[in-house]
Amino acid sequence: MTDRKAQLAANLAQVEERIASACAAAGRRREEVTLIVVTKTYPASDVRVLHELGVRHVAENRDQDAAPKATECADLSLTWHFVGQLQTNKVRSVASYADVVQSVDRTKLVTALSAAADRGGRELGCLLQVALDAESGERGERGGVAPDGIEELADAVAAAPGLRLDGLMTVAPLAGPFAGRQRAAFDRLMEFSSRLRGNHPAANMVSAGMSADLEDAVAAGATHVRVGTAVLGVRPGLG
């Protein structure tokens, strides 16, 4: 086993133990929570090692990094999640490799994703990114639709050819009433999820929690956690 594989295996084991403990504390089954490893800034070789170690869900947030990495790893059985803010001029590329786009936050993006998915003969899973720091009609600091825009955006995704409404995603906000209150933020997201499933029963995916707060997300009921640093290590500075 290479040094890198041993390092990643040890880190994965620690994260697995954290998720399992959080599930036990919340009275949930471990299989209710899917680990997504965020591989941004790390090479395709790490993705290959992660796959060897049993990881099946990976996430990227920049198309210029993700596209070549996905091509290089096209022979692997992986589900690719796009989690970054997405500009419409990158949609065609992202729609060619992503299985799930977790950052859908405006109807213009829905239209572009639908056209690209339809053109490529693909079905794209979509999560609505909810900004818990956004006022009505605005987008959040880190992207995301304001809570009062969820229903309209969900209906747009559900009606769009080539798209599948999978659920909701959030990033714990740095400002506003939920700043520093991750558990409360994730509890609120679960309330929105419950409401969404009233009209869209299949949209039951809830993506929340990262390396520092995955326990709060599991306790709240998240179905997916996005973990980067705790698995891959501290990211190199982008200079």
Image: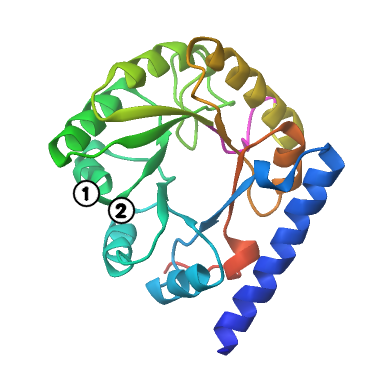
Is 17 placed above or below 185 here?
Answer: below
Q: Quadrant of residue 160?
A: top left
Q: Position of residue 154 (x, y in %)?
A: 41, 18
Q: Taking 132 as reference, is 138 left or right?
A: left
Q: Position of residue 107 (x, y in %)?
A: 31, 21
- Mark 2 touching mark 1, by CB under 8 A? yes
Q: Secondary structure at mark 2?
A: helix
Q: Please name the colour scheme applied to the rendered image.
A: rainbow
Q: Residue at x 49, y 58 (%)?
A: 56
Is 202 placed above or below 47 here?
Answer: above
* Residue 111 visible here: yes
Q: Quote the CA–CA distance across marks 2 and 1.
A: 7 Å
Position of the C terminus, as image quadrant, is bottom left
Q: Amino acid at mark 1?
A: Ser
Q: Residues within 10 Å of mark 2 (few under 14, many from 20)?
A: many
What residue is disc 1 on? Answer: 93
Find out whether residue 110 is within the magenta segment.
Answer: no
Q: Residue at x 86, y 43 (%)?
A: 25
Q: Secondary structure at mark 1?
A: helix
Nearer to us in this view, 177 or 198: 198
Q: Taking 17 as reference, is 153 left or right?
A: left
What residue is disc 2 on? Answer: 63
Is 189 placed above or below 156 here?
Answer: below
Q: Taking 12 as reference, is 73 left or right?
A: left
Q: Amino acid at mark 2?
A: Asp
Q: Which residues are magenta?
A: 169-177
Is 134 placed above or below 70 here?
Answer: above
Nearer to us in this view, 62 or 13: 13
Q: Residue at x 28, y 58 (%)?
A: 67
* Majority SS type along the magenta span: loop
Q: Residue at x 66, y 41 (%)?
A: 32
